[in-house]
Image (cartoon, rainbow, N blue to C red):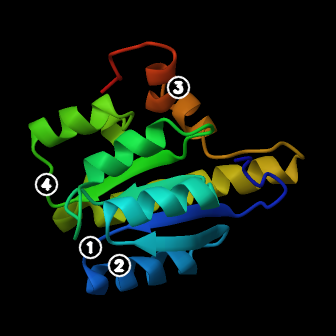
Amino acid sequence: MKRESASPALTVYLVEDSDLLASRLAEIIEQETGVRLVGRGAEADQAIAAISQLGPDIAIVDLSLRKGTGFEVLRAVSMLEPAPLCVVLSNHSSPEYRCTAEQFGVSGDHFFDKTEQLPSCMRLIRDIADQKLALAETGEASDGREHEQDHGGRSGQSARRAGGSQVRH
């Protein structure tokens, strides 16, 4: 599916099983200039289908879902062309979970603990949106991947498709 490049808004899909937290995150995301929430889901299959259909720039993924896991979502969407930039926001932030997420293309600086790092996660989204808007003003298209370049390398999804097994920390 081809991503809409004419729109300067950064599109985000939210995968979160808690209705209360999903509503609060949706409010925060929708308040950001240049960011548009295109959908949300609480189950792996539902999220995978929606992300495949909608083609958001970014998917914010919780690891615990009502049905399935966030890892299933990360695995499936990492194979999409183009794959959205995946950001994990979860209560499960142990090194083992981080390592598994990295196997599906989530770089270490895109993995956030819900209880302590929500502001940092939203700052990342805001920074990517600002970057996309700035590029749109100069006439260049962006899907948020420039942020990966600014942090020293290609996205985990690109590295995975290129045959790389290690994703930078």
Residue 78 image position (x, y, % from top left)? 45, 38
**Is 117 on the left-hand or right-hand side of 27?**
left
Q: Which mark is residue 17?
A: 1
Residue 165 image position (x, y, % from top left)? 34, 15
Going from N to C along the chain, the mark reached first, 2 or 4, is 2
Q: Name the residue: 45% across, 12% down.
A: 163
Please say if 52 is above or below 154. Answer: below
Helix, strand or loop at label 1? It is: loop
How many residues crowd mark 4 within 10 Å: few (<14), some (14–19), many (20+)?
A: some
Residue carrying label 2: 22
Residue carrying label 3: 158
The CA distance from mark 2 to mark 4 is 17 Å
How many residues crowd mark 1 within 10 Å: few (<14), some (14–19), many (20+)?
A: many
Helix, strand or loop at label 4? It is: loop
Going from N to C along the chain, the mark reached first, 4 or 1, is 1
Q: Name the residue: 21% across, 35% down.
A: 100
